[in-house]
Amino acid sequence: MTILTEAVRLTIAGVVQGVGFRPFIYRLACQNGLTGYVKNIGGSAVEVVLEGSSQDIERMVTQISSDKPSAAVIESIEARPLKAVGFREFRIVESDTSSHAPSNIPADMAVCDECMSEVLNPGSRWHGYPFNSCAVCGPRFSVMFDVPYDRANTSMREFHLCEECSRDYGDPGNVRRFHVQGISCPRCGPSLWVEDARGEPITTSDPISYVASRMEDGKAIAIKGLGGFHIACSATDDEVVRALRSRKRRPSKPFAVMALDLRVASKLVHVDLRSEKVLISPERPIVLLEIRKGSPLSPLVAPGLRHIGVFLPYTPLHHLLLKEYPDHFAIMTSGNPPGEPMCIDEACAKDKLSGFVDYFLLHNRKIVNRVDDSVVRFTDGRLSFLRRGRGYAPKWVRLPVKLASPVICFGAMLQNAGAVAFDDKAVLTQYIGDTDEYFTSLELERYLELLVRNYRIDVRMATVKHDLHPSYPSTKMAKDWGRRHGVQPDAVQHHWAHILSAMAENGLTEQAIGIAIDGTGYGDDGNIWGGEVIRCDLRGYSRLGHLSYVPLPGGDLAAMYPPRMLVSLLSRTMDESDVIRFFHRRGIIDFLPHGEDELRVIFQQCVSGSIRTSSLGRVLDAAASLLGFCQRRTYEGEPAIKLEANSREAAPLIEPILGGSDVLVLDTSAIFQELIQLLGRRSQGVLAFSLQYALGRGLAEIARARARRGDRLLVVSGGASVNTYIMKGITDGADERFRIVTNSLVPPGDGGIALGQCLADPRD
Ligand SMILES: [Zn+2]
Ligand SMILES: [Zn+2]
């Protein structure tokens, strides 16, 4: 009896490169007794040709979906029947370089459990090896010079496979190392060493134990990691933390803490099932979690806050260090000079970090691309990004439309990321940082250029987009690109772009009502916006309502000193002498460097008409000052973060009041009058909650009042949409007709704004 031979060609698209997918297909084919081949086509798909009995082929197709490697994402499997040609075996065929299909650049992945158990097993040849990795884990984007992800295109090309590693590479039975690009071992891979603060090498046979004991002595160590340098030191010793704060000129911004494992993390913070899943995920971000009562952390790690950022080791190096270090957790903060990007090479570290640290723990694998740790939090129970870096970037996001021509977006200014988009894909750069700093703005350009090169984008054929703010460095950079390549750049209004970012990642193109809330964004009337309700689609927007305009006394100073914003809000309803008396009574006068004289000047600035703002962030600043949680901003968002951290949920006490006619206005000065009436009658925490809730509720009421029949979508974005209490107010204030849509793949703050810019089509 002859078995009928069938043949089929599968095209499998998704995240299928750099994740052990071809070896996986190879093994399945062998197990099922099928012949044919597998090869990469472009970078986002593989082609599989199978020959054998239809039963075996069918079984294998099912197994592809059910047994795929953990890091692989299958977006589609397309099957086409073929005429069998009689393959005699199954083979992995070399990448087809003729294909011009764009690649999804693989993101870095945390070390997997199997690699880690080899590192911890005294009998394994990877015992104690800080750079172990396999098909489903290890560095990817951070070591890549170019696509596709082949060893020759990464900084691992410096390290030639030893005999044993070569054998693993060529052994189809070796599930985790067969044809895996980044593998190495202690014989052939990168190595570690220690230097002191002056750059003198320290002789030690065990660099990791050496620095662990120095940390025990209270020393700070600059550690070259995966995507850049960290500074590590004790998280329990007040003196050590205080010293780091003064050396880094960082008075109160919280430090992230790395904990050896979930058990150790649970001693520091409350870890529930939901946060556990994120903590141990291959992306392994920093997760903001509530500090446990009686936690051994020094109070100086996160002064005045209820949450700290905790993460687990994502390389064997970090794991081995924390295993040796007796606390099993430590401060692990990014190694950068104030205002500058994190160092990625020895020269930068020695030049710029030697004043902060006592030792350097270094290795000889080049970090090609800087990738900061990602930071996430939970907002009213759902995950939101504060920073999208390692583990996530630069994976692409699917757009709900197919673009006619490629787009290059420069984002906004602070905590910025850029993006390129083509077809139905948008690729955001990793988190870049505050691009008002010169060195950081150069990084934006560098990584946009990298994406442009990798995706073969012809800038002359592309649309260039930037924020509407005329003096953002990113706006100037976009205009410069436009001039250089002969294209006319488009300006996209900030808050419209925020709403579009949430629409993009949720696959929405229809008209929606958007609530965009943040600290600052340039409005089309020349004022600073930030508490906006708009109706929009991909082609434009109209303003339905906003927070009332209040003065921004002293411009940038107003954001630096929250008491200034308090004067601003009070100046609408109180006269100068009342405000002075109020500031004395509450003791807030002491926080104005020049006391009453300064207060009079600020008041005059307010009544004589300075720049005006509808920023929600500035209202939160004023509340943080009034309630005594923050009188001086030392890091971005500090007053708002402290206000939220000190809030206590209760029955809401403040009724939002809407005014205006055509465009509705939520009167924030009236909210402050209500708040002042309640001072002393309820706890500061309850008042803080009530204020945030009232702001959210008031904005949702604007949306409701301006909704037409058929309006179903309420899209909420902007940096302040990570605030749990504002979101509660919005959710309660919007009625059941609305489906509330938020960001979950990119930050709702300015780190995600480039995604929205990609989708904006202001010329249409
Ligand atoms: Zn692994
Ligand atoms: Zn080796």
Image (cartoon, rainbow, N blue to C red):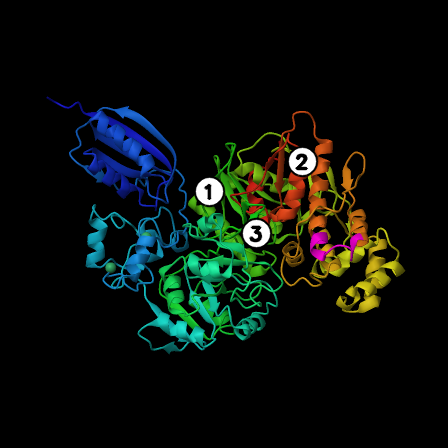
Label disc, if present, on residue 416 of the rendered structure: 3
- Which residue is labeled 1 in the image? 396
Is residue 610 visible in this depiction of the protein?
A: no
Label disc, if present, on residue 184 of the rendered structure: none
Alpha carbon of mark 3 to alpha carbon of mark 2: how far? 31 Å
Outermost residue on the left side: it is 1
Instruction: Give the image quarter of residue 5.
Output: top left
The location of residue 22, given as percent across then percent down, is 28, 41
Query: Residue 200 lies in magenta, yes or no?
Result: no
Point out the tag, 1 or 2, that comes first from the N-terminus.
1
Residue type indicated by callout 2? Ala
Q: Which residues are magenta?
A: 678-688
- Which residue is labeled 2 in the image? 734
Q: Are marks 3 and 2 in contact (CB under 8 Å)?
A: no
The structure residue drawn at horizontal position 44% and vertical position 73%, both measured from the top left corner, is 215
Instruction: Give the image quarter of residue 503.
Output: top right
Query: Residue 681 lies in magenta, yes or no?
Result: yes
